[in-house]
Image (cartoon, helix red, strand yellow):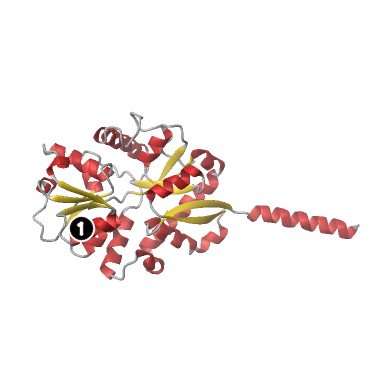
Amino acid sequence: MKFNIAFISLCLFVSCNSSATEKTIIRIGVQAQGTLEWELQALQDDSQMKLADFQLEIQHLANAEAGKIALQSGSVDMIVSDWVWVSSRRATGADFTFYPYSNTSGALVVAEKSPIYSIADLKGKRLGIAGGELDKNWLLLQALAQKDQFDLNTSVEKTFGAPPLINEQIKQDRVDAVLTYWHFAARLEAQGYRKIIDGRGILKALGINENVPSIGYVFKQSWAENHNQVISNFFKASKRAKNQLCTADAAWLKIIPLLHTDDVATQALMRQRYCEGGIEQWGEQEQQAAARIYTMLRTLSNNQLTGVSENLQPGTFWSLD
């Protein structure tokens, strides 16, 4: 009898102890060669992860669209995407929400000896654009050109394509300038190409002085409400990992293979640009600025980018309690 009581007590103890240490699994979709991969690698190397109440299950994705499909199908819990897409989905009844990850954005880049020094100089030139007609930086660059009283869309010879292809186009002198994603722009700059303006500069020229995140973590609001503390802890750990990559050389050296370049200058510039994208302030002012950007993008894209809603949808941005 005493043996049975002791055995039952031991089982209860093991069961309770197991429950106490059970971690919540966060299934996160990660694009191949994306910067989130760097951060998650640093996070996995963090000794504090042993005490974390979550465990990451990483699913590698081919591209941004694959991430959206995975999130909508429920095969992952979280991806990195943009808040414009989140708002467009919420307008159709989805409950996705957004928490900022980075405000580093793309850039307009030319060859070092190019005669192009301003947006006005693009008239009659060949422009390579990463993405498509609805790329946000392309739309906003057109808005900036309108301030100088010219239609950029009809004034340049456009080539659209994936970022690696666009980089090759300017290297082979098939285009005169490229508007591309930040890490591809950094690769060009490290090789001597010259930056005319970046996404943040475009916004400031359009009257948006707040640093609005370009991309962030996207997940279902209902899922987050059921895992509120875990989500909060993950975001804190993510920020800690980013700080490590920006301040500790030992942490940075571990993720260098993920950059897929042996060029030291390129590695250094990619680190600099990555670290410049840290979110230091995210509150009411920044969210109001995002709403103003949304209105611009809605007009510029003729509703094609933003969807049916006239305004940024309530609940687009997730707030930590």
Say above or below: 172 vs 143: below
Residue 252: percent from left, percent from top? 38, 66
Q: Is residue 184 left or right of residue 283?
A: left
The quadrant holding residue 184 is: bottom left
- As drawn, which residue projects farthest toward the top? 310
Identify which residue is drawn at 11% across, 39% down: 148
Residue 106: percent from left, percent from top? 26, 51
Q: What secondary structure is found at the residue carrying circle 1?
A: helix
> Is residue 203 visible to the viewer in this orientation of the structure?
no
Name the foreground residue: 272 vs 77: 77
Name the foreground residue: 127 vs 217: 127
Residue 67: percent from left, percent from top? 43, 49
Residue 208: percent from left, percent from top? 25, 39
Say above or below: 156 vs 33: above
Identify which residue is drawn at 46% across, 52% down: 29
Q: Is residue 139 left or right of residue 112?
A: right
> Is residue 27 visible to the viewer in this orientation of the structure?
yes
Quadrant of image for the N terminus? bottom right
- As drawn, which residue projects farthest toward the left? 115
Question: Label 1: which residue?
Answer: 169
Identify which residue is drawn at 15% across, 37% down: 146
Q: Identity of the amino acid at label 1?
A: Gln
